[in-house]
Amino acid sequence: MANLTRDFFIALSNNELLNKSAKKWGYRLGAEQFVAGTDIDSVIQTVKRLNDKGISCTVDNLGEFVTEKAESTTAKEKIISVIERIHEEQVSCHISVKLTQLGLDIDESFCLDNMREIVGTANKYDIFINIDTEDYHHYAPTIRVLDKLLQDFDNVGTVIQSYFYHAETDMDKYRDVRLRIVKGAYKESEKVAFQSKEEIDENFLKLAKKRLKCNTFTSIATHDHHIIQEIKQFAAEEGINKKNFEFQMLYGFRTEMQEQLANEGYLFCTYLPFGDDWYGYFMRRLAERPQNINLILKDKLYTSDNKLKKTPIVIAAASIAAACLLFCRRKK
């Protein structure tokens, strides 16, 4: 059942009609609940608000699988503008990028040139750039670009997806590189990836614990409170310095837990996506962990003491329901 739910949301994320509709109607349906605005000013204001709560941020200019050089160039320029604003405002924030937005599917050398400009600009201001890993098809070229960047820069890292069989090998290869550990949010073949939640979770914990012993800064990205609790206990038992790792969650998800972890003295980072191209990103978050639906509904419909809000925001439910309805109609 879990795999069926996952496949369903991945199918939704790839539906062209729904993606176009979401761009048009998203902010009327309430995409702002999990996307930090459409422009740089709104993102910076959100970063400041979270910084005031002791939470740092990583900003993602939404968009991927770009096939036109002009679109990739525009995305690069926007990302550089965000980097400049982070420096000007002196906020606690770094950048996450997807290489398919920056031309990986067009020309690898073109993508590398774009990344050199981005990472080089960020390097001047001591700002970290994280390369988000995507589906398995893009794994090898992503690693090639990363390896070339690492020859010249030390402010760039990437993501390890625990559902891949090769995740541990990759993590060991980048022992001295800042990494983010996630479960993985794309539909992958059983030839290359674990399929069950239990296996993915088990490997996630294995990777996180091994990595924590390396004393290289690591982002542990999960909304699963069971995993978070086990990591906290492991770190305490092993005497691991809290400054060597951070917990990371997505903007709009488990906001009370985010603040609680920061208040407990753990480094915490919120992943802040912004822009119009939010739909595929959001559906993959539901595919990655369908329980996120419950988190959204609870966050938006109920107060912390489990009472229905006076003016409940039914956005997430409306978005999901509308997506499901349109998808089903399209399939008929």
Image (cartoon, grey):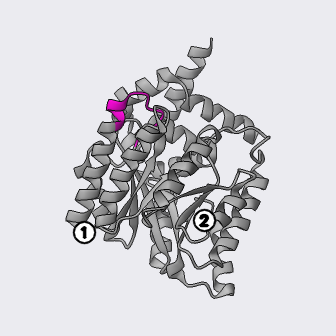
Give how far across and how far down residue 38 sits, in percent: 30, 42
Residue 264 visible in the current orientation: yes
SS at mark 2?
loop
Residue 42 visible in the current orientation: no
Tell me the quarter of the image containing the N terminus: top right
Prevailing secondary structure of the magenta residues: loop
Q: Are marks 2 and 1 in contact (CB under 8 Å)?
A: no
In the rendered structure, the answer to whether residue 319 lies left or right of residue 236 reads: left
Give how far across and how far down residue 42 sits, in percent: 25, 50
Give how far across and how far down residue 198 sits, in percent: 78, 54
Tell me the mark number nearer the camera, choosing from 2 and 1.
Answer: 2
Q: Is tag 2's residue or tag 1's residue first in the polypeptide sequence?
A: 1
* Residue sitting at x 70%, y 72%: 210
* Magenta span: 62-72
| Whether residue 267 is situated above or below residue 21 in the rendered picture | below
Which label was assigned to residue 90? 1
Nearer the observer, 68 or 298:
68
